[in-house]
Amino acid sequence: RRRKMVERVTTLMSQPEQIRNIGIVAHIDHGKTTLSDNLLAGAGMISEEIAGKACWMDSDEEEQARGITIDSSNVSMVHEYGGKEYLINMIDTPGHVDFGGDVTRAMRAVDGAVVLVDAVEGTMPQTETVLRQALKEGVRPVLFINKVDRLINELLVDEVEMQIRLGKVIDKVNRLIKGMNEEAYKSGWKLDAAEGTVAFGSALYNWAISIPYMKTSGVSFKDVYDCCKAGDMKTLAKSSPLCEVVLDMVVNHLPDPLVAQKRRVPIIWQHGDPSTTEGQAMLHCDPKGPACLMVTDISFDPHAGEVATGRLFSGTLKRGNELYVMGTAKNVNRLTQVAIFMGAERIEVESLNAGNIVAVTGLKDGMVGSTVSTMMEMQTFESLKHYSEPVMTVAVEAKNMKDLPKLVTVLRQVGKEDPTVLVKIDEETGEHLISGMGELHLEIITHRIHRDKGVEIVTTPPIVVYRETITGSIGPIEGKSPNRHNRFYLEFEPLSEEIVKKLKDGDIIMDVPAMERRDALLEAGFDKDEAKNLTAIQGTNMFFDMTKGIQNLNETMELVLEAWREALAGGPLANEQVQNTKIRLVDVKLHEDAIHRGPAQVIPAVRGAVKGGILMAGVSLLEPMQILQITVPQDHMGAATAQIQGRRGQVFDMKSEGDTITVIGKAPVAELFGFAGDVRSATEGRAMWSTEFAGFETVPAGMLKDVVKEIRKRKGLKEQIPEPADYLS
Ligand code: GDP
């Protein structure tokens, strides 16, 4: 039976009209895992008894224990509709905002998204976040409204009220789509129950209904209501099975790769030229063209080694193929296995075709986000944008000294597997630092290092990641080399919010032809001279070389940039990353003799000028913030509000719905340690809550000195905040 299934899947893989690449996106607890499991069971990929008990997609024991989905894994299933078979490649996306980065990369691999919304709760902030990510990637949404049984059996709404409530959810999601991408909304992406782009039902009880399905099956709205009211879920699951209704909607309304790639390639390969061979191949999802693959996930398998999963936009892949990873030294990466997924199982196949989500081994230079091709050179795909940033760090140490080399390898793997994790070594202390998106995220990572990778580690309690930035302009500041023969003159200016956004969105990048970069800068409001002279970007910092005709500067520039990057990696205030600065090199004096302008001279001169200049321009410390959303029964509102306000937070919205109320606010990450436990006990365990990254904000002036002191002490720096003269003498 299994062999049969593999055969069906491999046949369908080469028929793009019969393929749908989809993801389910939702706010945590709205029922995504339940829906995924029941779809798989319904499609005959796992037994129905297992579905609902063991969480199939939560293949990780960790995830099952915590009841949340962490990794994006994928599955393929076959669905029959209108006498034809379809291959549904489904990527699982995490339901917890601490892992927002994963949703972005999952959206890169798919063409359609089933947006799942709890009928009782309605849309939540995270519904908005994931919908926005889908639309940004050119991914088309359909809507599934879940937990309709609760409307009927818990909130006791009548049939009319039920329709009104469902209509409200649809209207809300439509308003979101329209607000986020009006063009897509007008081009037919507006959700419409009559057309069948909306379905509703109960993932838990395995039934669903849509208007087209009512028409063909003869099941009426009233039948559904009555059955559900009578608690007869079995009959409903027979007359309108979840899998049937939802996958019919997917097949009918979400685009196949042929249609989708025409729309998506210009979005996700914005800087590419559509008239090139690879451009044409991707636009037409051509299996005969050059292979173009974007890696969206890396995992480690004890037998196969590193497994790269991604979307194959064109070409065909076979074992033994030679591929190149863009942005690396262009070594040949020879594929050792090509495979597809069935459930959590990876199954080796003969070949992989354009338009599918595929898995390969042997891609040793590949990372999450890599552009991979059979061609040595191609324009890379748009980089994956993460809306969250690492805001907390732990230091880890091997329990046994002999494990140190293994720990170093494992940490490199961790960085590759999860692009939202930052792994680095502290230059001063030699400590290994892991930064992640929250307390829970870090807990899971460190736990896995121990369990999956077999390295026993000791971790410090998590600490908050801060940032430094400048508040004013200054310059030119002179940086002198130790031998006094080399001098660098730098000007400093804060970057505006609009420019920072453009950098984050990838609207201004180095990796494009010079002309294109210049146009982007002019459009962003830089003057002609600057538009010509952008030399480097680091995070949200820009460096411009405004000098003209200085002898030997060209060969010295790499050192200048190295020093600039070093200074930005640890600012003068607290050795935290610097952000949002614009630095212009306006004049340089270099010693004639190359021996006297080597790294030992240039690096300290420029690094000192950057750090000293930051202090003189006015430096401020920024702390990460988080949006908090707590849903509680009405009578616990006070406790929920107090949990936010008591943490230097502010409440800015409250929404009541039936007998619950949702309190929405914002608080600094530094105050959120132990939040989960405190909320639980303050509300007798009745609260549901979520957090979301809300950017960095200035640490209040009254606290600045203490916070800086604390950080410096922790890092073993001298407590006294440096003066400009410390860097510029
Ligand atoms: P996820 O966090 O989005 O993956 O949500 P889960 O699938 O883990 O579901 C969260 C909770 O909602 C679980 O307790 C489920 O049993 C429950 N649930 C899921 N779907 C339904 C439904 O249709 N009706 C009801 N009453 N509960 C549901």
Image (spheres, rainbow, N blue to C red):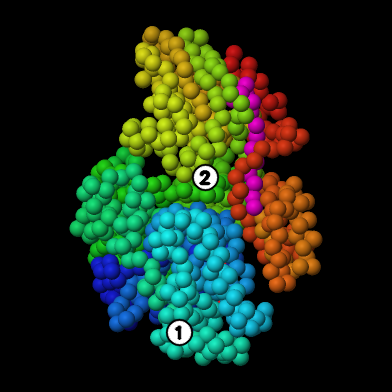
Task: Name the amino acid, label 1.
Answer: Met
Q: In this view, does 349 lie to the left or right of 469?
A: left
The image position of residue 256, as x and y in percent, is: 33, 66
Counting labels gives 2
Whichever of labels 2 and 1 marks the residue nearer the N terminus, that label is 1
Magenta part of the chain: 614-627
- The span from disc 2 to disc 1 (Cα, nearest Å) is 50 Å
In the rendered image, is residue 165 in sight?
Answer: yes
Residue drawn where x is 64% and y is 40% of the image: 697
The image position of residue 122, as x and y in percent, is: 60, 68
Please state which of residues 462 and 226 is positioned toward the viewer in this rendering.
226
503 vs 240: above or below = above
531 vs 693: above or below = above
Residue placed under numbered mark 2 in the picture: 422
Q: Residue 214 carries which label?
A: 1
Please state which of residues 302 and 24 is positioned toward the viewer in this rendering.
24
Q: Is residue 247 left or right of residue 65?
A: left
Q: The N terminus appears in which quarter of the rendering?
A: bottom left
Residue drawn where x is 28% and y is 52% of the image: 292
- Dot 1, crowdedness within 10 Å: few (<14), some or many (≥20)? some
Q: Nearer the viewer, mark 2 or mark 1?
A: 1
Residue 618 falls inside the magenta stretch: yes
Confirm if mark 1 falls within 8 A of ligand 1. Answer: no
The image position of residue 165, as x and y in percent, is: 60, 74
Please state which of residues 4 and 110 is positioned toward the viewer in this rendering.
110
What predominant SS class does the magenta segment belong to? strand
Task: Name the amino acid, label 2.
Answer: Leu
Q: Which mark is residue 400?
A: none
